[in-house]
């Protein structure tokens, strides 16, 4: 354990952070939402937008989700004061949303530069909140030991997407945009621990291993929401969402909902694909939010 990590730990070696609700909601409620807000969340297709404090510069991080999306997931599945874990936190969007909503949150990423970016983002706002947001550089494979059993109300994350980002960008829209992305390998790293460099089969197994270790950290009926797209590779659809659903079911999670994140309002300048012989829905126009929970009767 290095010096820096030790500063986040309590005397028992767990991260020193709150996880009990600080609101006055009834014990059976799963969140602090009023009926009027709840109704809006019932729709299974979500449209969200990026806002000023989102990071959209691909040089800072190549694949961020909007703070508004993270806020929506966190407010659905947690109460004020409860704990959110993001095992692949990237630029720290989950931590920013948790700070906005007064939730405790811990995010992990392999890359020290992303952890520095997270700390910069959460260090600049909301000094009045009672909750903490912490970013730690570590491999997602190591993180379950940082938490007491049944302490987290939500795991919310967007993991790397198999080795499909790990190739040179050649597609037409990038050529037309002339935006510096052509021929770039848009990947987080070539670190051998990076899940983004694995084949879909190996990736699925390793995602399963990681989430299996995290299951006991969730409270019973605590949710785990995973954001992934599918991909096209040499004219075959790579169904990442199906691989993850099947694998997590094997590892003890129960699938509750599949939500479509409609991204059509944030993609612009799409080139034409497939016409006139091959119909392909553009992966960038929507992604999946796979909502699982820890069933009530699993052991810690
Ligand atoms: C899709 S990005 C997450 C982006 C994040 N949602 C945001 O809004 O900034 C996935 C992240 O997983 C990280 N990563 C890859 N392999 C990892 C591992 N084994 N342990 C922890 N983080 C890992 C990458 O460095 C990358 O930042």
Image (tube, rainbow, N blue to C red):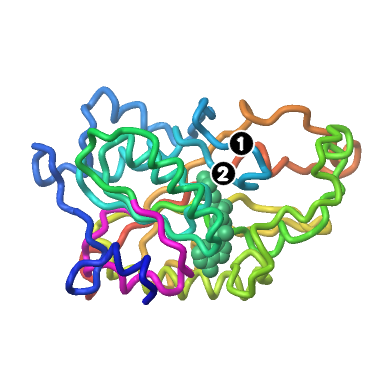
Left/right placement of residue 34 relative to residue 174 reads left
Q: Which residues are magenta?
A: 134-154
Q: Earlier in the sequence, mark 2 or mark 1?
A: 1
| Position in image of residue 51 (x %, y %) | 51, 26
| Residue 224 makes an appearance in the image | no
- The quadrant in which the C terminus is found is bottom left
Name the residue located 53 percent from the left edge and 60 percent from the top edge. 112
The extreme front residue here reads 3
84 magenta-colored: no
Left/right placement of residue 118 relative to residue 166 reads left
Left/right placement of residue 31 relative to residue 157 reads left
Q: Nearer the viewer, residue 195 or 72?
A: 195
Question: Badge 1 local density, few (<14 within 10 Å), some, or many (20+)?
Answer: some
Q: Nearer the viewer, residue 22 or 52?
A: 52
* Residue matched to label 1: 56
| Position in image of residue 288 (x %, y %) | 54, 47
- The quadrant in which the N terminus is found is bottom left
| Position in image of residue 203 (x %, y %) | 60, 70
Name the residue located 37 percent from the left edge and 52 percent from the top edge. 256
| Residue 159 makes an appearance in the image | yes
| Position in image of residue 14 (x %, y %) | 24, 69
Q: Nearer the viewer, residue 258 or 33?
A: 33
SS category of the residue bearing label 1: loop
Q: Is mark 2 within 8 Å of ligand 1?
A: yes
Q: Name the quarter showing ligand 1.
A: bottom right
Q: Which mark is residue 64?
A: 2
Number of on-image labels: 2
SS category of the residue bearing label 2: loop
Name the residue located 68 percent from the left edge and 41 percent from the top edge. 284
Q: Which mark is residue 1?
A: none
Marks 2 and 1 close (CB-CB < 8 Å): yes
């Amino acid at each position: 354990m290095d010096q820096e990590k030790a500063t986040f730990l309590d005397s028992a070696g767990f991260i020193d952070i709150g996880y009990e609700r600080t609101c006055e909601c009834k014990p059976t409620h799963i969140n602090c939402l009023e009926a009027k807000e709840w109704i809006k969340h019932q729709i299974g297709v979500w449209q969200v937008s990026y806002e000023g404090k989102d990071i959209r510069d691909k040089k800072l991080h190549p694949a961020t989700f909007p703070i508004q999306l993270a806020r929506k997931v966190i407010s659905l599945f947690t109460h004020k004061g409860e704990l959110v874990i993001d095992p692949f936190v990237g630029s720290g969007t989950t931590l920013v949303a948790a700070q906005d909503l007064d939730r405790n949150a811990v995010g992990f990423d392999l890359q020290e530069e992303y952890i520095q970016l997270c700390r910069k983002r959460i260090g600049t706002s909301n000094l009045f909140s009672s909750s903490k947001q912490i970013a730690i550089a570590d491999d997602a494979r190591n993180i379950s030991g940082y938490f007491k059993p049944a302490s987290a109300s939500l795991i919310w994350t967007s993991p790397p997407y198999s080795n499909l980002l790990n190739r040179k960008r050649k597609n037409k829209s990038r050529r037309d945009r002339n935006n510096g992305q052509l021929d770039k390998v848009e990947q987080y790293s070539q670190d051998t621990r990076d899940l983004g460099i694995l084949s879909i089969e190996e990736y699925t197994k390793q995602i399963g291993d990681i989430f299996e270790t995290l299951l006991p950290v969730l409270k019973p009926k605590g949710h785990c929401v995973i954001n992934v797209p599918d991909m096209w590779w040499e004219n075959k659809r790579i169904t990442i969402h199906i691989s993850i659903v099947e694998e997590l079911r094997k590892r003890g999670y129960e699938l509750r909902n599949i939500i479509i994140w409609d991204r059509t309002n944030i993609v612009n300048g799409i080139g034409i694909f497939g016409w006139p012989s091959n119909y392909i829905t553009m992966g960038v126009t929507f992604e999946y939010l796979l909502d699982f929970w820890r069933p009530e009767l699993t052991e810690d």
